[in-house]
Image (tube, helix red, strand yellow):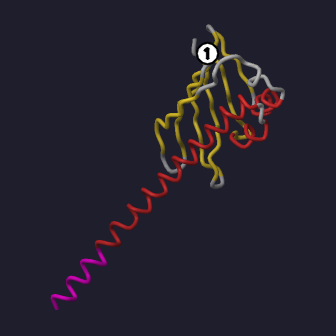
Amino acid sequence: MERKLKMACVIALSMILMPTGLFAQNKADDEEAVRATALDYVQGWYDADGARMQRALHPDLAKRGLVGASLQPVSAKGLVDLTRNGVGKNQPGKKEKEITVLDLSPTIASVKVVSDQFIDYLHLGKVRGKWVIINALWAYRR
């Protein structure tokens, strides 16, 4: 009887802990994927890699720059075109970047990207199993 009770406790405990372990692994995988998407965004820009930029973006991206008191919007297609045309590659500076995942849930995330020239706040969503940038707000760093 005591053996059966111990076995039942082991099974119950493993059932309780297993989802937690899986969630932790999924969260770590998601955080890595979110960082990779943010890196595609910023590095694609500076390397003039339109394909890299495109894979980071949702087709309905809403990107806006706050310059003075005005917002400067750009669409996903516009951003990919600017990237392919080398606008980011031609900008001066070291192009250093810092990516900070501010918040992460199973389907949405918030990320801060700091490069030599810009600060971007990104909202990402997990769409069909892939993390993509849905919203971006940027400002000049200096």
Q: In this view, does 76 lie above or below 117?
A: below
Secondary structure mostly taken by the magenta-highlighted segment of the chain: helix
Task: Name the quadrant of the N terminus.
Answer: bottom left
Q: Nearer the viewer, residue 84 or 138?
A: 84
Q: In this view, does 42 lie above or below 68?
A: below
Question: In the visual, does 56 lie left or right of 141?
Answer: right
> What residue is at 58 percent from the left and 48 percent from the top?
33
Residue 111: give x, y in percent of width and height.
53, 34
The three-letter amino acid code for the residue at tag 1 is Tyr
In the rendered image, residue 82 lying in the magenta stretch gets the answer: no
View extreme (front): residue: 94
Task: Name the quadrant of the C terminus.
Answer: top right
View extreme (top): residue: 68
Q: Hey, which quadrant is residue 87 in on the image? A: top right
> What residue is at 79 percent from the left and 36 percent from the top?
50
Q: Please provide the residue range marked out in magenta.
A: 1-12
View extreme (bottom): residue: 1
Residue 53: give x, y in percent of width and height.
73, 37
Q: Which of 48 and 129 is in front in this view?
A: 48
Q: Hey, which quadrant is residue 73 in on the image? A: top right
Q: In this view, does 83 lie above or below 57?
A: above
Mark 1 secondary-structure assignment: strand
List the residue tagged with mark 1: 140
Residue 117: give x, y in percent of width and height.
62, 18
Q: Which of 24 and 92 is in front in this view?
A: 92
Q: Hey, which quadrant is residue 8 in on the image? A: bottom left
Q: Is residue 36 above or below residue 117?
A: below
